[in-house]
Image (tube, rainbow, N blue to C red):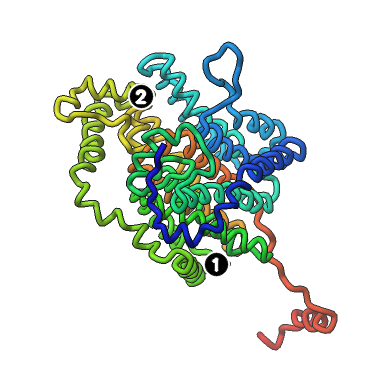
Amino acid sequence: MPKESSGPGCHINMLGLLLPFQRLFIPGLILLLLWAIYRTILKKDRPVGLVLFIALIIIVDSFYNTGIYIPGMERGSIKYSEVICFFLLLHGGETKSAGGRNHLIIFLTVSYFLLFFYAALRGYTLENGINNYRRLIVPQILAVWVAYKGFDEKEDYKRFLFYFFFLVIIVGLFTFWDAFFDRWILKSEVLYNPIYWSSRKQGRFGSIFLNPNYLGSFFVLMFFPLFILTIKQKMIWKKIFCWGGLLLFIFAFIKTESRGPMLGFAGSILFFLAIPTRQFPIRRKVGALIACVLILSLFLPGFFKAATGRFSSVEENMDEDRVSRSVIWEFTIKNLIADYPLFGIGFGELQYIMTMRKYGFLNEYKYTLHNPHNSYLEIAVMAGCVTLLIFLRVCWVVIKSNIVYIRRHQDDDLSLFLLAMTSGIAGFLICLMVDMQMFTISVAPVFWVILFISRSLTFLKPSPVFVRQPDEEERPLYENRHLDISHFR
């Protein structure tokens, strides 16, 4: 099958020396997978296991679209990520007590998923609704389940982010090889689907997420935690590894040319700068971001123009966007949500399409989208405004408690990593305004993992601030200075 290349020939000539390394990718990934399984199952390493869980969801469950085959069933009914989830739950850490507010979050989250189950029962058909719930919502439930306890030790949070770099590097390498060499380092039948080719023909890349918008929102969610881990590294080889992975990740984000995630990323930057931390004041934050831009300019000249190029075409695409975004939003709100405000029309894209036709949308327009292309509206139209309010309440409670913790413990490392995660969450919530990330197999579970990992971080006690003790010569001065204070009266 012919592929269109968007990378200039000079790039291929300059980087052609990297091509022989492609034969090492698959053996390397297999060894990495075996090591991660060993650490997760035999060594009960939760940080490695949680990254493996996410990687299996993105690469195996979504990209390869496969599962464990059960004789007599048409499709595999057990996903590989669910097997790892079983071991993570079997070797779970201790539940941390956080009082009534934590109970409130758990209650709201359970209510959210139960309301979606009720919506699934009212899908276009019962079978269609249950299949959609099994495919899209169950992975999110498992993500919450394995993440809400967090980790037992502070260093485990850093280890989780460090191991996350392996997944990020895979994502970046896929885009790099696709953009410059016109080759896939991983092959799957889904690469022949329009979800990949429609964007690929425009010079936009979605890596193993296929859709550039999904990859963009994934970047917004994970950039700042990985960025903070990178600049906090002290060992040289870890610094090189993290910086290399971060640059690949940024390159993959730039090649998405996705406007929604670009705006979400701008929002996460503002959030990151606005919340103060003594250990990392605003001048250092700005300096670190500028250094990142300069390094990126050195290795990827012209990246800013490539990243913002599609914003210049907004006016040219206004009519198309108006049909696919503004009109669909307005029609959904004024008709479907207005008539089914409490519990929605039922779960599933087929149910949405048939309901839009029922309300006469095709009488004015030639086609309708499969969903509103807005995660908030999609929650409201399929499961009701009550479900949407619950989702917003969960996000608000977590973000608010994270900010309180950050402001109270500004001198601790934990607050800096918590700020990074919260910045990613805030930016991701902006991305949801223009796409359906909360109804994807690959992105939505990652959001729930980071949301509850950040929540669990606030349960840990901050490290005590180190105070230098006086030596033997200074001790008499410290002991005597409080004995006689009469001359100060």
Answer few, some or many: residues within 10 Å of disc 1's Cα (few below 14, many 20 plus, some between 14 and 19). Answer: some
| Viewer can see residue 287 | yes
Q: Residue at left 22%, top 19%? A: 358
Query: Closest to the observer: 298 or 334?
Result: 298
Checking the image for residue 343, the label placed there is 2
Q: Count all numbered tags in the image, as a single digit.
A: 2
Q: Residue furthest right?
A: 472
Q: Residue furthest top?
A: 72
| Kind of residue sitting beneath label 2 | Phe
Q: Quadrant of residue 474?
A: bottom right
435 to the left or right of 244: left
Q: Residue at left 46%, top 20%? A: 131
Q: Residue furthest left?
A: 364
Q: Residue at left 58%, top 48%? A: 22
| Viewer can see residue 416 | no
Labels 1 and 2: the sequence-earlier one: 1
For label 2, the SS is loop
103 to the left or right of 87: left
Query: Closest to the observer: 295 or 129?
Result: 295
**Percent x, y for residue 230?**
59, 61
Answer few, some or many: residues within 10 Å of disc 2's Cα (few below 14, many 20 plus, some between 14 and 19). Answer: many
Checking the image for residue 371, the label placed there is none
**Percent x, y for residue 39?**
73, 41
- Reading the image, the residue beneath label 1 is 280
| Kind of residue sitting beneath label 1 | Phe
In the picture, the quarter occupied by the C terminus is: bottom right
